Image (cartoon, coloured by chain):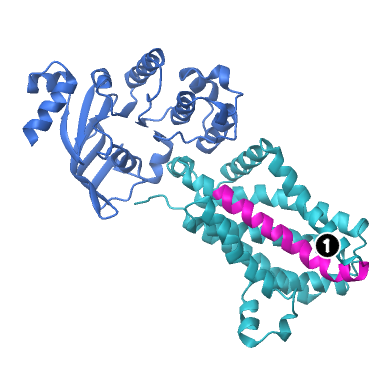
Amino acid sequence: MTNSAVTATALRVARGGREVLRDVGFAIPRGSVTGLLGPSGCGKTTLLRAVVGVQAITGGAVEVLGRPAGHTALRHKIGYATQNPAVYADLTVAECLRYFAAVLGAGDVDQVLRDVDLLDHADHLVGTLSGGQRGRASLAVALLGSPELLVLDEPTVGLDPVLREDLWTLFHRLAATGTTLIVSSHVMDEAARCDRLLFLRDGRVLADDTPAGLRAETGEQDLEQAFLHLVRSAA
Amino acid sequence: MNPTTTLATARRVLTQLRHDPRTVAMLLVVPTLLMTLLRFVFNDERVFTRTAPALLGVFPFMIMFLVASVTTLRERTTATLERLMTMPMGRLDLILGYAIAFGALAVAQVGIATAVCAWWLGMAVTGSVWTLLVIAVLDALLGMALGLFVSAFASSEFQAIQFMPLFVLPQFLLCGLLQPRDQMGWPLRWLSDVMPLSYAVDALSRVTAGTGFTGAIRTDLLVVAGCVLLALALGAGTLRRQTA
């Protein structure tokens, strides 16, 4: 158990009378990058919200860093970047980060801005940034205070390939220092960059394995084909 | 309760406003403009003196209600509230941070309007101008606290703005400004008794007419201050760490 940063057992979530997550179980090892992949609307965001503890769950349990998800002691240890950038449009990038840093008691504003390559935009209003830049500003907030667990909902959407490459390098650098990352994406070509994959479809876990393990199991080299193979054999 | 996060939040809200100078200018000037308009509508200093103090409380009450409900609604509907709820941020700290920022703004807003009324528009105050100022600021805070609270029940800016006529105008109609409260029929009288603005307007009328800081004024102020605290606590209660 101590090797797992996040464990979910028989997790169920219903929203508006509809089952969004049905009997989801998995374990995420510490110091790894886990990709949460699946089509739009399959329950990725709900699952991530359950991990950070803002989602009311209907059954099962989620344990994060040895405590139940949402525990007070976890609030210093988790960095969370929502799908829609959670930054104040009417503040500059630096003002926004300084505010969240004050809430967290963190002091590494310049460092995280360098990590997401926004240092030269520090004095720009968030509202004037491009979509991709705004997403990176939101990612920077999640990085504040070097959290043990980073939960990132589609962090690379709308980024050019060079920046995407830089961010994946950053994710693996963080994982090498012991940080656990859960990164969601609906783009299959990001799957190969992850240490582990969690395929989600219709609120169920379709696969929980390493990329190599999935290729071996399905006999497909391409991970998108592997996903399709699993969908077909589950049907 | 954590003073660091409370003050950081207050500073953040004020910084957001600083980037929006048009809103700040309107907040500071509009009540004064309305009072000036009223003065020339009456075109008589004595009639103006009878009505002005009550309106000095009512205008900031309305404006703060609107500004506070829209601002907090924005926080609730964007992902920033969800992010803050995953951080070591107390719900009361967040609400108090907003209260401090808007409270500072209310002091400036009411201060300007009172000064202009007393020195240029000929409003004669028999009691203390300072007491008048305190009551008017408390009114503005009451509007802010109610605005924070009702923003929980709005899911869009359209709804939030509609809450103004719903929550604010009945208080205005029943506060004793249009018709003395003791001349209302019992159902209206009773309604007027449970509305906080009535106590604020009573206190303002007492200051204008009477002398010094009487026990009746103190009671009125305590009722208004109690309502402010109650609305802030209820507002904090409506922030949810977990949502469905």
Q: Nearer the viewer, residue A51 or B165?
A: B165
Q: Quadrant of residue A35?
A: top left
Residue type highlighted by circle 1: Leu
> Residue beneath label 1, please?
B38
Q: Residue furthest top?
A: A162
Chain letter for the blue part: A
* Residue positioned 26% across, 43% down in the render: A62
Q: Nearer the viewer, residue B240 or B6?
A: B240
How far across and down, in percent of the image, does residue A233 sit?
Answer: 6, 32
* Residue positioned 66% across, 50% down in the render: B102
The reply to whether residue A134 is visible in this rendering is yes
Q: Is residue A158 left or right of residue A232?
A: right
* Residue positioned 55% across, 29% down in the render: A126
How far across and down, in percent of the image, does residue B131 sit?
Answer: 82, 64
**Secondary structure beneath disc 1?**
helix
A132 in relation to B97, above or below: above
Q: Quadrant of residue A164?
A: top left
Range of magenta residues? B44-72
* Residue positioned 87% across, 54% down in the render: B116
Q: Colour of chain B?
A: cyan
How far across and down, in percent of the image, does residue A229 sit?
Answer: 10, 26
**For residue B49: magenta?**
yes
Instruction: Please report, as a chain letter, where disc 1 is located.
Output: B
Q: Residue furthest front?
A: B41
